[in-house]
Amino acid sequence: MGAKRKASEPAELLRLRSEDPEEALEIARADSQSVSIAQDCPPPPSYKADRPLVESYTWHSSARYESAGAGKARAVTSRRPDDTPYMLGIDEAGRGPVLGPMVYGAAYCPIAYEGQLERLGFADSKTLTAARRSELLRVLCKPARGAHMSGAALSDPSSDNLEWAVRVMSPFDISRGMLRKTPYNLNAQSHDATIMLIRDVIQMGYNIAEAYIDTVGIASQYQDFLSGVFPTIKFTVTSKADSIYPIVGAASIAAKVTRDSVLEGWTYRNALPAMLVAESDDSDFGSGYPGDPRTVAWLERNMDPVFGFPAVARFSWATVKNMLEKKAAHVRWSDEPPKIQKYFVPTTRSHQSTLVRDLRLAPVTSL
């Protein structure tokens, strides 16, 4: 079911309601876009429109395969097995929203291509309009066309200088990890997504010499951690890396456009009843952030007192937990395990099994 965003409150009002500047910017930008992203930007090849997003997956532009996760069989095909030194950037989209996936994007190209990236105008995707993101997405999908550069390899229209990949983390997988008895928190999931993307690129034969990463947590600690995992790569980890390094800006574009497309064309696992579709506008997600009144209104309209929310919601978010606690049907589990004290209470006649009482059995010592 496709989604269409519509302006319901002034952007400035939404901006004031949010305490997180990044969240406020995203809410305001979503509010200002009165047309569907699908109309402004054609869906990227990393968006799987033919099936619901139930399981997280990885998509690579430079390989003919998809990866659902660790341990899944996959065919890896390298397009550039030589020793050309590459630079790689990684950024995410959708860390804070209560709706939709979190998407990690990676972009990588020969180090000699860095100057061209700057001229193309790659920057933090959150500062760009949907139309500009659409233009840069076309560059990601067909990077060499129209590029005029020195050097035979870089000026060859058939050469693929800029490759990219995304790790699409489903709301279900995010929540399942965070709601474990021993939580698999969002930082740990982010670290693993980053490592997975880098490892995939290396396994495809690319010589990654430099990597620029938008930080998760303390930058110096994260940089030391990644350097320990990949000792041959020179890492630079910093906040706002997407606005500093064009290669991270390209990764930001890949992540942002993929996430927007997934949320815009969200496919429900089970078709909604026609009556409910007619009575409720289930497409107005807003920005997906907890501070967006439209997002909160959507959650309130679509909460089932027994089953909770559709799979687009992250059940591990406080916004969802609080709504379920206040408005969902309360469940009392009657088949609870016995308390440990029960095993230390002396057995009396009243505690004996029904069979023992019916057969009038007694210990030999009592005869």
Image (cartoon, grey):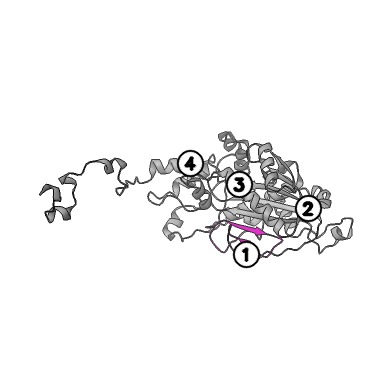
> Label 2 to label 3, Cα distance in Å?
23 Å
Residue 37 x %, y %: 63, 53
Q: Which of marks 4 and 2 is nearer the N terminus?
A: 2
> Label 4 to label 1, Cα distance in Å?
37 Å
Local SS, label 1? loop
Answer whether labels 4 and 1 touch (C-beta < 8 Å).
Answer: no
> Label 4 to label 3, Cα distance in Å?
21 Å
Residue 145 lies within the magenta run: no
Residue 354 x %, y %: 17, 53
Residue 55 lies within the magenta run: yes
Local SS, label 3? helix
According to the picture, the residue beneath numbered tag 4 turns out to be 319
Q: Which of marks 1 and 2 is nearer the N terminus?
A: 1
According to the picture, the residue beneath numbered tag 2 turns out to be 86
Tell which tag, 4 or 3, sits nearer the viewer.
Answer: 3
The dominant secondary structure in magenta is loop
According to the picture, the residue beneath numbered tag 1 turns out to be 74
Q: What stretch is highlighted in magenta?
A: 49-70
Q: Which three-letter amino acid code belongs to the residue tagged 1? A: Arg
Q: Which of marks 4 and 3 is nearer the N terminus?
A: 3
Q: Residue furthest left?
A: 367
Q: Residue 190 carries which label?
A: 3
**Residue drawn at 69 percent across, 48 percent down:** 90
